[in-house]
Amino acid sequence: MIDNANDGKRLFAQPYFVTPHAVQRFRERVVDIPPARVIEAAQEMLQDSGLPVDAEMRDGKLALIYRARYAGKTVYLTVGRGDTASEGKPWPAVITVMSEESVLHGVLCRADTKRGRRWRYEDRKALIVPLREAGFTIRECSAILRIAHTTIERHLKRLGLAKKQPRKWRPRDMAVLCQLRDKGTSYKDIAARLGRSPIAVRVKFCRLLKRYAATREDPERQAVLRVLATCLDPGKVLSMARRAGLLEKLKRDAEEVESCESRRVL
């Protein structure tokens, strides 16, 4: 929740703590505007910021650098973990702000991409493990560090951190995937629900489409799949059992069994 110049309040889906140092650097390097507006502008730029364009280590912790535009200028925001808490969880903190005069901007805009990849090469290899621990895939690490994904894989293999075996898909997960895609749910939202990456969800769905291409053209097979999907959903099974009175019948049967056993004991 950020106070703006009109003393109004805005809620941001992904709140960030903007440090006083970052506010000062923004006013010096980008645009000299009131501090309250700087904080609001940083929040706006970091909503749906996409993949970081670079990363670095600050005080032994990973910091991600995001690129945005403000007032026609390119802005780089360095984001780490802050001490300010929201519902018991620390907010990401905007540590500092860089502009088009920064070294990073020159490297990213350099036509010679090979020289750009060699920039601080050893330091960049040291960022591979922290990025992987932060949840980035090998391809995403490759894009952030501007290093070939094969180089990243070799580096992880030398460290004994080879890529893990992919998590197997359970029948229930595949049923949920198909149900949500039929409703038009995005891969990103499905991935968040299933605890997987959007790429893994997209690849699995495409494979299911190829595998069940004939099934999708057959109405009878589609009906069977809908029945199976319903049976794999505990909530729907419970709802159907209640409507059919099966739970009450099972309760009566259990009571009859208990009464019979008590008579035998007597």
Image: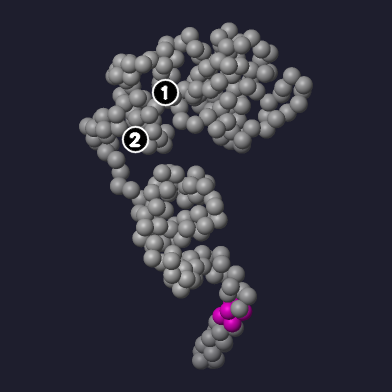
Q: Residue at x 58, y 35 (%)?
A: 88
Residue 120 position within the rendered picture, expressed as x and y whole percent measured from the top left: 32, 16
Q: Position of residue 115 (x, y in %)?
A: 31, 15
Residue corresponding to mark 2 = 138
Q: Label 1 near label 2: C-beta < 8 Å?
A: no
Q: Which residue is mark 1?
A: 55
The quarter of the displayed image where residue 52 is located: top left
- Could you tell me which secondary element the residue under label 2 belongs to? helix
For residue 12, above or below residue 243: above
* Number of numbered discs visible in the structure rendering: 2
Amino acid residing under circle 1: Ala
Are there few (<14), some (14-19), or many (20+) residues within 10 Å of tag 2?
many
Location of residue 26 with respect to 93 vertically, above or below:
above
Quarter of the picture holding the C terminus = bottom right
Nearest the eye: 131 or 188: 188
Is 191 on the left-hand or right-hand side of 5? left
Q: Which one is nearer the viewer's eye here, 257 or 161?
A: 161
Please give the name of the residue rendered at 39% of the width and 52% of the height, measured from the top-left corner: 206
Crowd class of label 1 (few under 14; some 14 to 19; many from 20; radius 10 Å):
many
Left or right position of 80 against 157: right
- Nearer-N-terminus badge (2/1): 1
The one nearer the camera, 177 or 24, is: 177
Helix, strand or loop under label 1: strand
Q: Quadrant of the N terminus?
A: top right
Which span of residues is magenta-colored?
A: 245-250
Q: Residue furthest left?
A: 158
> Does residue 136 sit above or below 93 in this rendering?
below
Amino acid type shown at disc 2: Ile
Find out whether residue 157 is within the magenta segment: no
- The residue at the point 31 percent across, 26 percent down is 147
Please report the residue visible at 35 percent of the width from the left and 35 percent of the height from the top.
139
